[in-house]
Image: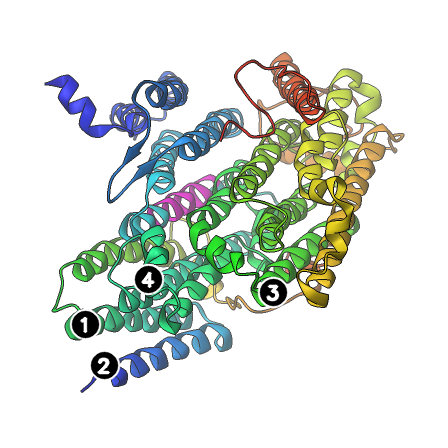
Amino acid sequence: MIRNLLGRVYPFYPVLFILGSGIITLFFGLSEKKPYKLLAVALSAFSLAGSLFINIFSFNLKGEFNSSLFNFGTLQVLLNSIVLFSAINILLFLALFNFAKKNFIKIIIMFDICITSFIFFIASVNFIMIFVSLVFFAAGAFQIVTSLSRGNLSKSIPEYSVKNNIIRFFLLSAFSLLLMFFGFSLLFGATDLKSFSTVIESDFKNTSLLKTGFFLILCSAFTFGGFVPLHSPYMKMQRRIENTGTIIIWLLYLPAGLFIFLKLKDVLFNFLGGHNNYIIAVLLAVSAASILAGNIGAIRTTSIRRIFSFLMLGIMGLSIAGFVQYGLGLFDEKSVMIYLVSNVILAGAAYIPLMSVFYYLENINGSDHIGNIKGFGRQNIYLAINMSIIMLALGGLPGTYGYLARISLLSPYIKNPGSIFAEAGGTFSKILNISVIVVMLIAWAFIAVNMIRLILVIYSRSEKKTGAGQAGFEEGLPGVGRALTAGPQKKAILPVFIYIYVTFFTLLIILAGIAGLFELFGLKQLLTGISIMSLNL
Amino acid sequence: MNLQFIILSSFALFLLGIFGLSFYRSFLSSIIAFQFIIFSATINFFGFSLFLYNASAWDKTFIFFAFASIYLLLFLIVFYNYSMQTGVYELDVKKDFRFFIFSRSDWWGEDRIGDD
């Protein structure tokens, strides 16, 4: 009977683990005692680790799953693994920076629900499941962000400012979901089919009602992801909320925005496959605007949070450029998915270790001003070297995973330079090709410049301490790092754990980069069984 | 009453919602604009179902689950706005909630806290 029951819940074994841990944690939901909080963290960590394992193991054992509501294939396993791995790291951030909070256990429970919704969203194919799971995920993210920001306000940021901007961001999120709802209503009018792949295979795919519906859903994907020009609420909120909240937005919320594009892939491939230059031009315009706004904006700001928020905007823009390449006939469907997923992996692998250090320093100094990390590289040589490698990887340094994510977009032009001026697509197509290359090179250069700027700041000479720094130091959370002396530029003592943590990610990025380079040059796979360049898709 | 009239009126409601979101600043106006979009989508679902699909059950199922989830999200936002659990409530939090406004700081330079 148990085997029969387990057979029915496949492929949602990870959900069983997470919900199981969540239900047990519910019993201690009102407790503020330290042992119970520890128990909640341990339960959640074990359930997430178990989920990650069972996600891959069960797929190897049982294979693909298809039904009218859900689809579970290699792509879904990969996306689930990314989300669960991110979740484990976010839990670490939660435990490090929010353990002292009264509502800590409630936050953990909300976090479990949020991850569960995300897992359902990844596997869903039916319109009802896509919509409902995404709304529940957004609601979960909202609850976590608001709960984290409660009672953890810096003196320099008034509470009304935090509240205003959280509400504005999630109103935009609700708006995008309502656009999607309206889009689905139009799809229902055009055909009563219930999934994107079946709709696009039907005879009604060229009706104007259907195209309008798809257009609105595409708009909702852009709005949900906070693409330019609707990035204002995102940029403002990230500067003001509690630091773990920003990680949740970067590693869960924005990837969910990108995963909507993966849900829409059949639709996009269908319309882009016909060399529809105007759709390609619109996608390229949004991508280029996000890349340029993200990277140029980051150069002028002195807030570390804003720098990384801007860069994330640039990475989001870069990710959808894969669809532009498909439209130009330079990528196949698989390459687009690999490219998009590899960007999400790169962002996660770089942001997690970097922000763990930066947020420790922010808590010590009481501010995320870039001046506070001056001289950090001279005091913490080992950590600074690791961080430099990770930042250079994000900038696209050859030999790291970042290089692979960047070069894959330009590789069709490198393999066949003649494709830029191919006669097939006409003048408009040539202009698009050249625009793509220019935008990609600018993106690569600007991200690299931003990273080099941060590295130079880390290794620059520290300045004399000011009174403002002292005030900021007093605002730092207790027990999350300490300065040897009061000044922000003096040596900050970080736990040994952070050193190991950052080293792990550095090695991961370098190893994946070298393995990928081996594959790129046609040599044998360094990691047996795992293809870095194709992500085993 | 024909399908064309229903679609056009629902589309008018949708445009009213978009206009409300772009023009009005207050929190309540945004929430009311959202209602216009929700109702326009609901009219579409029921209209198409009645005229094209002999009142099928799928649209009702969709609307039931969509309402349950989207109103949960909207309720959470409204509750957070008017809740006294935070130190700031209602009257203090009624600045500009428009999505389609562009400040220089979103593109370039520093973000001055307190301007919002």
Q: Give the secondary structure at mark 2.
A: helix
Can you tell which mark lies on residue A277?
A: 3
* C-alpha separation, residue under disc 1 versus residue under disc 3: 34 Å
Q: Give percent across and percent down for residue B78.
A: 36, 59
Amino acid residing under circle 1 = Leu
* Residue with the mark numbered 2: B3
Residue A138: in magenta span: yes
Q: Give the secondary structure at mark 4.
A: helix
Query: Which residue shows up at 27% across the image and 26% down it?
Result: A16
Q: Nearer the viewer, mark 1 or mark 4?
A: 1
Query: Which residue shows up at 17% across the image and 61% down it?
Result: B60
- Tell me if label 2 and label 1 are in contact, CB under 8 Å: yes
Q: Give the secondary structure at mark 3.
A: helix
Q: Is residue A517 left or right of residue B84?
A: right
Q: Which stretch did the figure color magenta? A: A135-148
Q: Pick out the residue farthest to the right.
A: A461
* C-alpha separation, residue under disc 4 versus residue under disc 2: 17 Å
Same chain under badges 1 and 4? The reply is no
Can you tell which mark lies on residue B52?
A: 1
| Residue A301 visible in this rendered orientation of the protein | no
Can you tell which mark lies on residue A184?
A: 4
* C-alpha separation, residue under disc 2 versus residue under disc 3: 34 Å
Q: Give the secondary structure at mark 1.
A: helix
- Tell me if label 1 and label 3 are in contact, CB under 8 Å: no
Image quarter hosting the N terminus of chain A: top left
